[in-house]
Amino acid sequence: MPEASAPRSPVKVPLFSAAQERVGDFEVAGGVFGREGDVGLLHEAVKMQLARRRSGTAATKTRGLIAGGGRKPWRQKGTGRARAGSIRSPLWRHGGTIFGPQPRDYSYKMPKKAWRHALCLALSDRARAGKVFVVESLALAEPKTRHAKAFLDKLGVRAALIVVGDGDDGFYRAARNLSAHRLLRVRGLNVYDVLNYAELVMTQATARAIETHLAGDAR
């Protein structure tokens, strides 16, 4: 049997108190936040996400979708003109379109293991750059947008992806209107948003939830 690969060492990221002051470092799993690999996998993951967002609404009308033309324009023989069965024929002006585009679904899936690996690579890139901020709590005095903005400004983030857990509903309601930031649940974490925002903010509990969520690929 092949030998199991050695577990990756934990990665240290900055830890901040509920008052947005740095109090030390927080260790996160190296299998999730300390991965290295082919960056081409990140490209494939982002390309898949963008393809799934395409609306695919381009459409043309075939002869069967155009109103009118149910009556034969003239009799089959004896007029000296070419045979015609409908004024909505593709050969006629204002007629239908032959083989025109129709609404389609551009989405496709990549292997689940590859997707999870790409997400680990994206998280690792942010951790390596020192852009992962772990806070002890996201609790606010009041669930108000101004309090959430002041919290993030004091933390020193300008365009952050904030991953919220089950106990962060108050912060979620307060910060969801901030246009510079984006909030996601752990299950909604994705490669595109991790790479699209400069910083990543989460609580200690949320960091552990992400590790559990990606445990299948943290080897």
Image: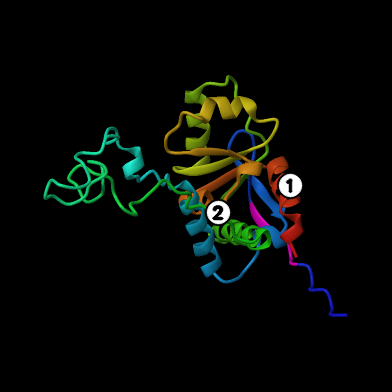
94 sits to left or right of 23: left
Quarter of the image with the N terminus is: bottom right
Residue 189 is situated, as x and y percent measured from the top left of the image, at 60, 46
76 sits to left or right of 42: left
- Marks 2 and 1, how far apart in space? 18 Å
* Amino acid type, mark 1: Arg
Name the residue located 35 percent from the left edge and 45 percent from the top edge: 59
Name the residue located 59 percent from the left edge and 28 percent from the top edge: 171
Q: Quadrant of residue 94?
A: top left
Residue 42 is situated, as x and y percent measured from the top left of the image, at 53, 62
- Residue placed under numbered mark 2 in the picture: 191
Residue 27 is situated, as x and y percent measured from the top left of the image, at 71, 54
Residue 197 is situated, as x and y percent measured from the top left of the image, at 47, 48
From which residue to which does the magenta span run? 8-13
- Residue placed under numbered mark 1 in the picture: 208
Q: Is residue 18 above or below residue 218?
A: above
Name the residue located 31 percent from the left edge and 53 percent from the top edge: 98
Residue 61 can be seen in this image: no
* Amino acid type, mark 2: Val
- Furthest-front residue in view? 78
Instruction: Say which element carries label 1.
Output: helix
Residue 210 can be seen in this image: yes
Give the colouring mode of the picture.
rainbow
